């Protein structure tokens, strides 16, 4: 792989850009691999990358039904934060956030990480107490956050209306090193690095069956033929239930649609990410100037990648109250993704009833921010067969044993 | 917008009138059951890509619960039926057989 650098740009500028290589190869599948990862979204590619980088396992294939990063990785609102209440959540999300800080250098691919700061508005007395508690918890966990008053909110984000008609802004939980990144670039950067390590990234290849013998996975059937594998990692978000059914077990997961939309581009007016959980909307401004908007998930099972109009209406109504200047913006694009919601709104990184099959799912509405940490922890689980400290609390058995990581209560909403 | 006809009051209700209630026909377990039974009842779900039987409540209407048979891929509604049953009625199953041959897999 030729490294990207200022020198490479200068060199190619002098020879009509003829020397750029394909960022990753598109090989046909081999007969067998040490590890097959199903799902070439951010989490799947990060799992493969850290398998190679941290554990030296490079005979790996990443199988993708559609195209690379074409699912939720390319459909989210790119927010990165780690201001969680529960210790296991804060640990894995902060690991991810800290890996994002240097990911562009690690991958030699500009993922445009922008630690512009994330604030979660407190708009009720209950939220003030909740976020103060979270700020104290974060201090103990080593996550840098603070609770700020309304005047600081206004300084950081002048377009906010503090005295909204329904819910005035009473303060905010502020994480200065949270922010955004370019979501496609995260998938592309990991894919390029994986391909460079000799891993096979196989797109347009749908898994149709999982073969097992004596409680162990022996291989998979795909639309590009059968592939044998020593270990299998299922990292498919919304379609986790479909793959689990193929493998013969059930998950505590329901798949629902989550929507996002972007406005026409406008001049820079907002250099932080703002989340308003009581009225339920969140917004940031992309580098192109579009306002990137997200809201709540639908309540019913859905695999269509489009959601209910009334949810978007609620989100936009809430944001117009919070940011009156956006009231006349036209919306450019509007889309949905299928998110995998667990009973406690926390992810699953776990062994499964099949001995050499592992699953990473349940990130629900907040998976993008976790990609590097999730891949790091999943790679350790797959390589060693046992979860490391980051994944230990996120096993499937927590639902049987009642050891929930209850972020749904902590956040008050999906997160 | 999703439209479901409430079998209790007969109103063709829009999604905004309705509250989703998740997978239908779960068998409730009681005291003395194993942890695994409670896990199955409380958390494990079919979450099918295709035909789904689910509970809905006509929240901003008559307020009553009912069942719906729906496709999670096309959002097609096969029918709604009473909440006072432990399994989908035959006429709805036959209708699904007609529209989704082999769905029982």
Image: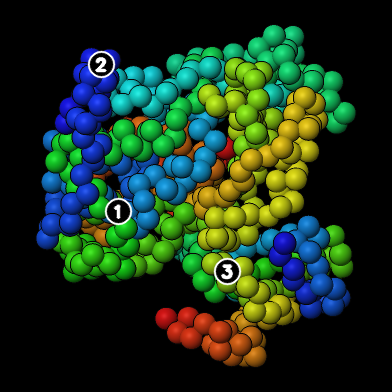
For disc 2, the chain is A
Give the residue at x 18% y 56%: A28
Instruction: Name the image quarter holding residue B89.
Output: bottom right
In whole angstroms, how far apart are the C-alphas of marks 1 and 3? 25 Å
Placement of A298 over or under A224, stated as above or below: above
Residue topped by disc 2: A10
Residue mark closest to the camera, 1 vs 3:
1
For disc 1, the chain is A
Element at label 1: loop
In whole angstroms, how far apart are the C-alphas of marks 3 and 2? 51 Å
Give the residue at x 42% y 23%: A112
Nearer to the camera, A100 or A1: A1
Element at label 2: helix
Placement of B43 over or under A137, stated as above or below: below
Residue A352: mark in rendering:
none
For disc 3, the chain is B
Whole-percent x, y for residue A148 in the image: 67, 12
Residue topped by disc 3: B74
Residue mark closest to the camera, 3 vs 2:
2
- Whether residue A291 sits left or right of residue A185 in the image: it is right
Whole-percent x, y for residue A189 in the image: 31, 33
Residue topped by disc 1: A203
In whole angstroms, how far apart are the C-alphas of marks 1 and 2? 32 Å
Whole-percent x, y for residue A403 in the image: 47, 44
Give the residue at x 54% y 67%: B73
Label 3 Cα crowd, 10 Å radius (few <14 / some 14-19 / many 20+): few
Residue mark closest to the camera, 1 vs 2:
2
Give the residue at x 87% y 68%: B62
Whole-percent x, y for residue A314 in the image: 75, 43
Image quarter hosting the C terminus of chain B: bottom left
């Amino acid at each position: 792989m030729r490294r990207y650098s200022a020198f490479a740009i200068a060199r190619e500028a002098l020879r009509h850009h003829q020397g750029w290589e394909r960022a990753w190869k598109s090989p046909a599948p081999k007969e067998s691999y040490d590890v097959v990862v199903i799902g070439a979204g951010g989490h799947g590619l990060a799992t493969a990358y850290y398998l190679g980088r941290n554990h030296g396992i490079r005979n790996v294939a990443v199988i993708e039904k559609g195209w690379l990063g074409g699912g939720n990785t390319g459909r989210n609102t790119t927010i990165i934060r780690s201001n969680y209440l529960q210790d296991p959540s804060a640990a894995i999300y902060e690991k991810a956030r800290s890996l994002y800080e240097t990911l562009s250098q690690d991958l030699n691919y500009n993922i445009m990480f922008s630690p512009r700061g994330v604030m979660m508005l407190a708009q009720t007395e209950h939220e003030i107490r909740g976020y103060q508690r979270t700020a104290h918890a974060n201090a103990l966990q080593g996550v840098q956050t603070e609770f700020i008053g309304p005047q600081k909110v206004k300084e950081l984000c002048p377009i906010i209306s503090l005295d909204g008609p329904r819910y005035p802004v009473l303060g905010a939980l502020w994480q200065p090193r949270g922010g955004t990144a370019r979501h496609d670039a995260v998938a592309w950067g990991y894919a390029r690095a994986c391909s460079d390590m000799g891993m096979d990234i196989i797109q347009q290849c749908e898994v149709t069956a999982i073969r097992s013998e004596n409680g162990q996975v022996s291989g998979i059937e795909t639309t590009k033929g059968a592939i044998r594998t020593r270990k299998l990692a299922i990292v498919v978000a919304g379609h986790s239930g479909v793959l689990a059914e193929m493998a013969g077990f059930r998950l505590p997961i329901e798949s629902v649609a989550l929507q996002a939309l972007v406005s026409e581009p406008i001049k820079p007016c907002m250099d932080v990410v703002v989340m308003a959980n009581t009225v339920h909307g969140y917004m940031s401004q992309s580098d192109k100037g579009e306002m990137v908007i997200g809201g709540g998930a639908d309540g019913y099972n859905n695999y269509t990648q489009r959601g209910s109009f009334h949810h978007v209406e609620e989100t936009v109504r809430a944001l117009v109250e919070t940011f009156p200047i956006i009231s006349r913006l036209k919306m450019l694009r509007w889309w949905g993704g299928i998110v995998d919601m667990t009973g406690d709104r926390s992810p699953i990184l776990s062994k499964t009833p099949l001995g050499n099959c592992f699953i990473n799912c349940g990130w629900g509405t907040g998976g993008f921010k976790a990609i590097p940490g999730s891949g790091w922890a999943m790679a350790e689980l797959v390589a060693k067969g046992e979860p490391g400290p980051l994944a230990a609390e996120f096993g499937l058995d927590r639902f049987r044993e009642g050891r929930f990581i209850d972020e749904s209560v902590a956040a008050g909403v999906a997160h | 917008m999703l439209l479901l006809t409430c079998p209790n009051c007969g109103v063709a209700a829009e999604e905004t009138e309705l509250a989703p209630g998740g997978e239908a026909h779960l068998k409730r377990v009681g005291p003395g059951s194993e942890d695994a039974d409670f896990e199955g009842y409380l958390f494990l779900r079919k979450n099918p890509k295709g035909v789904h039987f689910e509970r809905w409540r006509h929240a901003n209407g008559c307020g009553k619960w009912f069942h719906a048979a729906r496709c999670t891929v096309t959002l097609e509604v096969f029918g709604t039926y009473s909440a006072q049953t432990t399994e989908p009625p035959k006429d709805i199953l036959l209708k699904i057989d007609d529209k989704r041959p082999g769905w029982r897999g």
